[in-house]
């Protein structure tokens, strides 16, 4: 399989250690990630503030808010949801990307630090994300954001939560989401697609790690037929009336097949969708190998997609 990897992405992959995601190892994995995290180096033109709101059942829900310092205009806003298989990761992991969205796409960004499984299995993470989304909409005036231009985005498990959140907001009829960007989303708990069967080990995320993530996220629901579409959006039967969608996946990502199916179902439901397939790219390639030309291109395409989607909404509303 490594022979198919883009040569520029291979050195970083060779250095990546496979994760053993047993629950008893998670505290050490999370601690190791925290020690490796580089402090935020956010551009001086951007303000970064931490806020704690009341989440579901009055649990504290941390948010990170990014916006341009010298822009007092009413801005579009992007709710960003970090990845990590529903079991690892924090809002701080994506400071650079969120800052770049602000700088290049001309928007505010709110990044939600949702609770993680297995300590907090479904529905805690998705309800945290919905609470953050609702808080943004409820406080649109004080936040000085445009209620008609709210986007949701995230990668991997964050992409799965993005896809789930747009379904949830549609069905709860609040708030209105103008576009979604679920990047290589983790959306199918059945873990039995052609690509997940093809990528059984290695390559950052694979069938084995995917199984571990879903087991912890779903808890007692795992392995049953009672999985809600808000937990695993691949199980949804109705994709109509969802927002404009941008998504992508690497060809060597175990989520390739479920993403392709998702894109097809969105298109067949009349949802406008833009999709990119990156050959030679494994899961999370743009984070694992950030300086590779393909990684730089992919991240620039994410940023441009956010900018284009907000501009598209503004043109429709004009």
Image (spheres, rainbow, N blue to C red):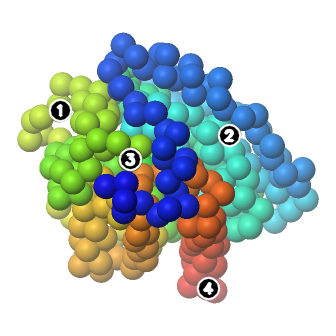
Rounded to the nearest angstrom, the CA distance separating label 4 from label 1 is 44 Å
3 or 1: mark nearer the eye: 3
The residue tagged 4 is 315
Q: Secondary structure at mark 4?
A: helix
Kindly indicate whether the residue at mark 1 contacts the one at mark 4 (C-beta within 8 angstroms). no
Foreground disc of the pair 2, 4: 2
> Which mark sits nearer the N-terminus, 4 or 1?
1
Q: Earlier in the sequence, mark 1 or mark 2?
A: 2
Taking the image as shown, residue 141 lies to the left or right of residue 128, namely right
Q: Is residue 51 above or below residue 241?
A: above
Name the residue that disc number 3 marks. 203
Q: Disc 1 designates what residue?
A: 222
The answer to whether residue 48 is seen in the rendering is yes
- SS at badge 1: loop
Res 148 seen here: no
Residue with the most extreme top position? 24
Q: In the displayed structure, does residue 103 sit left or right of residue 163?
A: right
Residue 206 or 58: which is nearer the viewer?
206
Looking at the rendered structure, which numbered label has been put on residue 64? 2
Residue sitting farthest toward the front: 3
Q: Please give the name of the residue rendered at 50% of the width and 54% of the height, measured from the top-left corner.
A: 10
* Residue sitting nearer the eye, 301 or 69: 301
Q: CA distance from mark 3 to mark 1?
A: 24 Å
Within-10-Å neighbours for mark 1: few <14, some 14–19, many 20+: some
Structural distance between the alpha carbons of marks 2 and 4? 29 Å
How many circles with numbers are drawn on the protein?
4
Q: Secondary structure at mark 3?
A: loop
């Amino acid at each position: 399989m490594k022979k198919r990897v883009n040569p520029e992405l291979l050195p970083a992959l060779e250095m990546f250690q496979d994760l053993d995601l047993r629950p008893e190892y998670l505290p050490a994995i999370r601690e190791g990630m925290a020690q490796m995290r580089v402090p935020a180096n956010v551009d001086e033109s951007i303000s970064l503030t931490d806020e704690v709101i009341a989440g579901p059942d009055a649990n504290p829900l941390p948010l990170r808010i990014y916006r341009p310092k010298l822009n007092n205009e009413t801005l579009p806003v992007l709710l960003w949801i970090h990845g990590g298989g529903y079991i690892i990761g924090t809002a701080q992991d994506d400071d650079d990307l969120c800052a770049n969205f602000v700088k290049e796409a001309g928007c505010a960004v709110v990044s939600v630090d949702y609770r993680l499984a297995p300590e907090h299995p479904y529905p805690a993470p998705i309800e945290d994300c919905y609470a953050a989304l609702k808080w943004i909409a409820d406080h649109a005036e004080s936040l000085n954001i445009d209620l008609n231009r709210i986007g949701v985005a995230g990668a991997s498990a964050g992409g799965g939560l993005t896809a789930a959140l747009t379904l949830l907001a549609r069905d709860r009829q609040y708030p209105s989401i103008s576009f979604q960007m679920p990047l290589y989303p983790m959306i199918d708990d059945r873990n039995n697609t052609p690509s997940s069967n093809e990528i059984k080990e290695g390559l950052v995320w694979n069938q084995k790690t995917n199984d571990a993530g879903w087991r912890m996220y779903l808890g007692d629901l795992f392995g049953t037929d009672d999985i809600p579409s808000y937990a695993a959006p691949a199980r949804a039967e109705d994709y109509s009336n969802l927002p404009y969608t941008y998504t992508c996946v690497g060809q060597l990502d175990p989520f390739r097949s479920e993403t392709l199916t998702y894109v097809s179902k969105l298109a067949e439901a009349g949802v406008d969708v833009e999709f990119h397939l990156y050959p030679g790219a494994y899961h999370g390639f743009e984070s694992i190998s950030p300086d590779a030309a393909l990684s730089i291109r992919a991240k620039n395409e994410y940023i441009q997609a956010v900018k284009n989607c907000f501009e598209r909404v503004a043109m429709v509303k004009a």
